[in-house]
Image (cartoon, grey):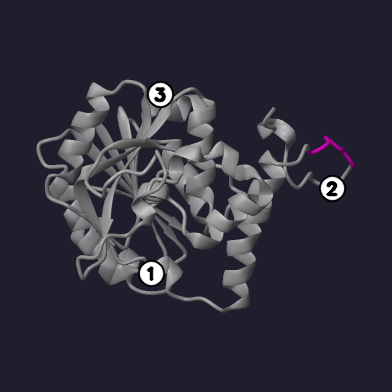
Amino acid sequence: MKLSIVVVSHNACNLLRIGLNAAIRAAQGISHEVFVVDNASVDSSIAMLNNDFQDINIIANDKNEGIAKAYNQALRQVQGEYVLLVNADTITGKKTVEKALEFMDHHPDAGGLGVRMITPEGSFLKESKRGFNRPWEAFFRLTGLARYFSKSRLNNPPSKDWVDEFQTSETDVVNGAFMLLRRSAINSAGLMDEHFHTYGYDIDYSYRIKLAGFRNYYFGKTYIINFDIQNKVKFSWKHVKEYYGAMIIFATKYLFKVPEIKVEGIPQLIPPSYEVK
């Protein structure tokens, strides 16, 4: 099988229907399978999936334990040579999957691929090329972790790494809205870190793909439309906890050496297996 499409959704019934139809249309003519992991939606998502998409694999969770954990549920079952992780609020262009797979086939060093993202109004999203927004960029700069992400500074014109919106280039981070992954890269990098609940999982996994010896690319010759509903609701305690908590987890993993302390009955917060030397 060529491609496995995986979507994680939570209370996004209407956008999920549109996004799934677009992704399946984009995969026409390509041997593929589709997994949808529903994270305890209380809307009509499951009923809609059962009625409208009878040929897909549905994993219905009774508790929302995060995006990374939900993706791992599907990653344990996928059969495709490539795996496309796509957000429920994303509309995939008609030729996007075909063009992205063709690029991956011609670049065996590519472990992950992201594409040009635009808003429903047609504006280019700068996160397409660097994979993280300004708070994450400031976080990397202040902590010194920016040295691990030099290729992500792709939209700063004075920089030698700057590339045009439509130009293809190597990058550090593949945005989670559309992550096309080589199955062999997944096998080498392992499953996603389930400490990341809503944010940061894509940055962490992109970096681990690099640590596994693969390259990540920004492919600007095709596009997706992203509604970015994940970042619409802000200024709540839950958002602050999950958003900035992801930064702390990332720094703990890669900036500091975490000693292995074993106390009976108390799990270690972050295993030291991702230490960067």
* Residue in the picture at 18% in, 49% down: 24
Q: Which residue is mark 2?
A: 266
Q: Secondary structure at mark 3?
A: helix
Q: Is residue 140 left or right of residue 170?
A: right
Pinpoint residue 183: horizontal percent, then vertical percent. Answer: 38, 28
Q: Quadrant of the N terminus?
A: top left
Marks 2 and 1: CB-CB under 8 Å?
A: no
Whether residue 65 is visible to the viewer of this picture, yes or no, is no
Q: Which residues are magenta?
A: 258-263
| Amino acid type at mark 1 | Ile
Q: Secondary structure at mark 1?
A: helix
Q: CA distance from mark 3 to mark 1?
A: 31 Å
Q: Is residue 53 above or below residue 219?
A: below
Q: Which residue is mark 1?
A: 229
Pinpoint residue 250: horizontal percent, then vertical percent. Answer: 64, 47
| Amino acid type at mark 3 | Ser
As drawn, which residue projects farthest toward the bottom? 235
Q: Is residue 272 left or right of residue 2?
A: right
* Residue in the picture at 23% in, 64% down: 17
Q: Secondary structure at mark 2?
A: loop
Whether residue 214 is visible to the viewer of this picture, yes or no, is yes
Q: Which residue is mark 3?
A: 184
Magenta-colored stretch includes residue 105: no
